[in-house]
Image (spheres, helix red, strand yellow):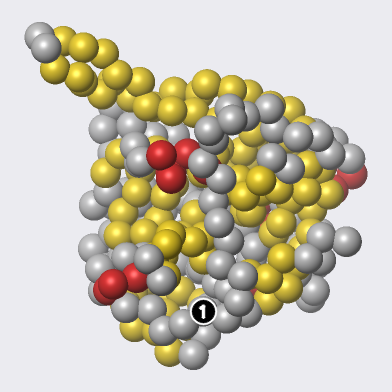
Amino acid sequence: MLKIFLALIICIISANVFALSNSQPAEKKSHESVVQILVPGPDQDGSIVDGLCNATVINSRTLISAAHCFARSTVLNGEAFKIEVGAYKYIEKNGQIIRIGYAVKNKFSRTAKVHFITGVNPQSVQIPPDLDIVSVNLDQDLLLPADFSFATLWPTTLPNLDQNSKINIVSINPIETISNNDTKQFAYLNSFTQKNYQIESRSISRVAPGDSGAAVFASINGQEYLIGVVKGAAQTVFSNWDVIALEQNRLK
């Protein structure tokens, strides 16, 4: 049985209409681990449609994502879902290297076992924010390059985070882009307060629909770790606070 200790679950609820605002292209090698997933599940009219979410690859068979991305999905019944791994494209023009956008390089279709946290009803449309994270164990390896940059998951209780932790979100969001085709982006949280199992953030960077499951990284002891996922802006509140819930949980 797969056991993963997850140090942080992120729920960010924002009234901002721009996906991951005040962000920039996620071009770093360490951003490679964040991928787009298309998970089939019932629409409001009962038809099966692909829901767009993010996931983070921690090894060739394991993804970390948001629980609501897989709740009620056909993946729970043994159906496959799609995984898209991409990269930024560049051209040389007048002696300069110019970025021309983010594009999918590899597409995979995989069946998987989805490991929810105890207390989650996989058939519910409402997932508690502090439980909105899953480990997805693929039934077949992803065929990735030998130098692929897998994310490292923080394994124990989080220390107190501060500005030196450089908390940042990496998201692929084709719904709303920061510039033409730059659908993969990252942004730092520059203003937040950590209290027990919650962070309250008034950072200039905010999330929006389409950022669900996006990776949250932090620098701890000089190394970057995956510390959680974005639940996504599932609701709109009339507040300039992003509420971020922290919880120590076990996935089995």
Residue 62 horizontal/vertical position (percent): 71, 48
Q: Quadrant of the C terminus?
A: bottom right
Of 3 and 23, nearer the camera is: 3
Instruction: Give the residue displayed 45% in from the left and 66% down from the top.
Output: 12
Of 72 and 99, nearer the camera is: 99
Residue 54 horizontal/vertical position (percent): 55, 45
Of 18 and 102, nearer the camera is: 102
Residue 205 horizontal/vertical position (percent): 28, 59
Residue designated by label 1:
158
Q: Is residue 82 visible?
A: no
Of 66 and 99, nearer the camera is: 99
Instruction: Give the residue displayed 31% in from the left and 54% down from the top.
Output: 187
Residue positioned most to the top: 94
Q: Is residue 18 left or right of residue 106?
A: left
Q: Is residue 20 left or right of residue 109?
A: left
Q: Secondary structure at mark 1?
A: loop
Above or below — where is 19 with respect to 168?
above
